[in-house]
Amino acid sequence: MAPPNDHVDSIFSVPGGERLEKYFDLSGGKFSVKGVPLLTEVPANVSFSPFSSICEPSDAPLPLLQRVLGMSDKGGFLGFSKDEPSHRLMNALGRFTNRNFLSIFRFKTWWSTMWVGKSGSDLQMETQWVLLDVPEIRSYVIIIPIIEGSFRSALHPGSDGHAMISAESGSTKSKTSKFDAIAYVHVSENPYNLMKEAYTALRVHLNTFRLLEEKTAPNLVDKFGWCTWDAFYLTVEPVGVWHGVNEFAKGGVSPRFLIIDDGWQSINLDGENPNEDAKNLVLGGTQMTARLHRLDECEKFRKYRGGSLLGPDAPKFDPKKPKMLISKAIELEHAEKDRDKAIQSGATDLSEFEAKIQYIKKELNALFGGDESSAASSCSQGCGSCSRNGKAENYGMKAFTRDLRKKFKGLDDIYVWHALCGAWGGVRPGSTHLNSKIVPCKVSPGLDGTMTDLAVVKIVEGGIGLVHPDQAEDFYDSMHSYLAQVGITGVKVDVIHTLEYLSEEYGGRVELAKAYFKGLTSSLSKNFSGSGLIASMQQCNDFFFLGTNQISIGRVGDDFWFQDPNGDPMGVYWLQGVHMIHCAYNSMWMGQIIQPDWDMFQSDHLCAKFHAGSRAICGGPVYVSDSVGGHNFDLLKKLVYPDGTIPKCHHFALPTRDCLFKNPLFDRQTILKIWNFNKYGGVIGAFNCQGAGWDPKEQRIKGYSECYKPMSGSVHVSDIEWNQKTEAAQMGEAEEYVVYFNESEALLLATSKSDPIQITIQPSSFELVSFVPVAKLGPAAVKFAPIGLTNMFNSGGTIQELEYIESGVAEKSSVEIKVKGGGNFLAYSSGSPKKCFLNGAEVAFEWLGSGTLTLNLPWVEEAGGISDVAFVF
């Protein structure tokens, strides 16, 4: 076998003089696929090159290279040239009209979402890819702007149907005038195969990232967790975290992972004492100009005394206090906004505003009191003194994580948050051994069309304390090696796309990103088992093409917003549908490279069940950000087993084919449908997300109240893309299926030739539909299909093993099933079983003439919650 780093040109040589089929052609100002014009009025300075003529050497595994070889004729590269070199070049690719497209564009620096249209002028700025429907040849074509040299690219709208491409380095010192491969084009008859094939080809071509199939996802991917962010914001501290985890354990859904979000770090503001933490920060935004002044935990965590929460005299915790602090901080924020509006309107006398602000600040400080730093601590001298006296083992984060694991035995992972540059404002110059300096932020013109964002405003206001890229590896290893020593098993890395603001003096955004991601990758491999990192605020092609050699999981949606920060009272509802759209469509490309993470939600939110339904079949981890005392345990128990694991689907959820070129947010007709697989069946989630979406004119996501209405649609077994997973392909060929509706509890039979099943979904509501292949047992041809535990949202995910046994003895047939979880087990059986056995003992069951077969299963801790069920016919 040839070594995996053999030159690609030898791999791509065509044996025996065979000619590859020619799919694409650029001539006469037209770019065509199999004779069908995709782009017209293509400028003369645009070029097209077949994949095999451009592809460079790659370290991709040989099987992956061979896969790319088999489809190399289906792809190629677009380039263009200019007369004068520049650091940012814009060029037309050609014109298209009256052709349906699906695209992904950046609506904020950090976040991307879907957009549909019919012409090049309908594209949005900073489009990451566009998928074109080509029904003339029953195919789809994707155009993906990529990276060439030190330049990255994005698509933009042009006038009169033209599609534009921009290529920028991010530094006026890095210029060029010619590109041979600045965008990749690929064609396929199947849109899901298309995404897989295109990103596999780019993995080989760019050789700077790896696919999800080449990496190991972190352990938390099939578990339940808790993130502290919405519970505490920046007021997070050990006692609150402890009580939060304890409440889940008492409620019967123990978290298997914990994310201590923003608020644990040692940060302060310019002008403050460089050796002290910033005081009394509460809301996100107040910390965005702060910088790290040391690389370990802040004082409120450093002062934690080991064992103080394990004994009978453990410090008390008032669950109302975080809510009071947050409420008062919001009041302060509103007062400051009122002052700013007065300034903008020309007011000169601000004394009344300032007096109110100072009064609220005084109230806020009083609420904090003097107990913030003394919580769970009897150390009067502080952590520094303890360290000098050799007592560090019993103080600080190490003692806290040790106590958490001692009390909560199933807590496998504890992650902490940090920004890519350390803190939101980076690292304070002179505060650590690292060489950092304040770098002013310059926002790319490509982001002019994005939504106004407080984070961007604050970061531009304060600049970033950037550690020199030569020290990126030292920077991350210094943070992460310490965290690993004190019991932290992973990190959530946020604010990733700040680097593009800072690249002027560092060779440009591509070169700066390469240096930082190389350091991050090295530290991840060394300190967190190669997989203990969740990427966030990273939804741009720079990250995916340069930062994912090792990173294997990341967010596919914007943040969970429990209400509209801009004040629309209906936002509490419509923002939740927007979140699902982000996640579903972003998974189409991100899921090729990382495990999609659909983010946390709050189980007591007005739309918590809506979120829970999507998380149940998303195929990734399930975690919440509940406040202490703010839980809906009945809801969580439909998602999570008592041991903190989840009935996870075997793929990542994707939109169904009939949703690809529709707008399920405000077209007044489309239900979002997502498909996934369980081990022994498929599942469709149907969600009414109508009621909000992107407004290109206002450049923001807003409510469309006229769309917030019941929606009708249909589901069919063919909505599930069975061929996307080898193990599922056979299920897609079944003669008949049992169809189970989890919410309405309806059960019926259908075949691939049956008419679609009509459904109506209320606003902010959903239905989960399981499709389970029917087997025929014995001479009587009894029809049988196991549905699973109906008290779980993902019923089919509870079935661990299934075996049909035909015995010649007395013409007996039996079904043996391993089911995880306790509750109501449901199967379809056209005839009544003769006997039923549960864990080896004969038990009673209920069978109705309609075919429903039910049995109550216990949760047996000693068996890991797994029951052995057997039916004899």
Image (spheres, grey):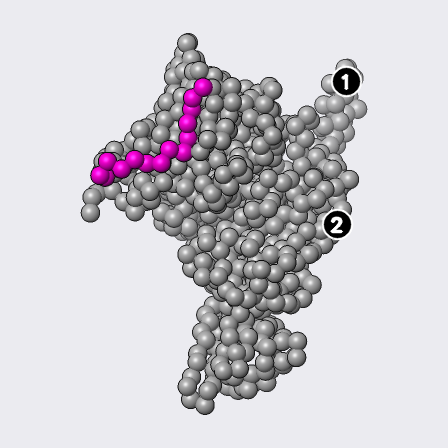
* Left-right relation of 181 to 280: left
Q: Is residue 18 magenta?
A: yes
Amino acid of disc 2: Pro
Q: Is residue 743 above or below residue 862?
A: above
For label 2, the residue is 710
2 or 1: tag closer to the N-terminus: 1
Q: Is residue 796 above or below residue 18?
A: below
- Give the magenta-colored segment's residue range: 15-28
Residue located 41% across and 27% down the image: 25
Q: Is residue 286 above or below residue 262?
A: above
In percent of width and height, residue 159 lies at 60, 19
In percent of width and height, residue 693 lies at 67, 37
Residue projecting furthest to the top: 84
In percent of width and height, residue 534 lies at 47, 44
Count numbered badges in the picture. Answer: 2
* Badge nearest the viewer, 2 or 1: 2
Residue located 63% across and 75% down the image: 852
In percent of width and height, residue 73 lies at 36, 36
Comparing 301 with 215, the one in front is 215
Comparing 557 with 14, the one in front is 14
For label 1, the residue is 345
Comparing 206 with 15, the one in front is 15
Residue projecting furthest to the bottom: 810
Amino acid of disc 1: Ser
Q: CA distance from mark 2 to mark 1?
A: 42 Å
Q: Is residue 537 magenta?
A: no
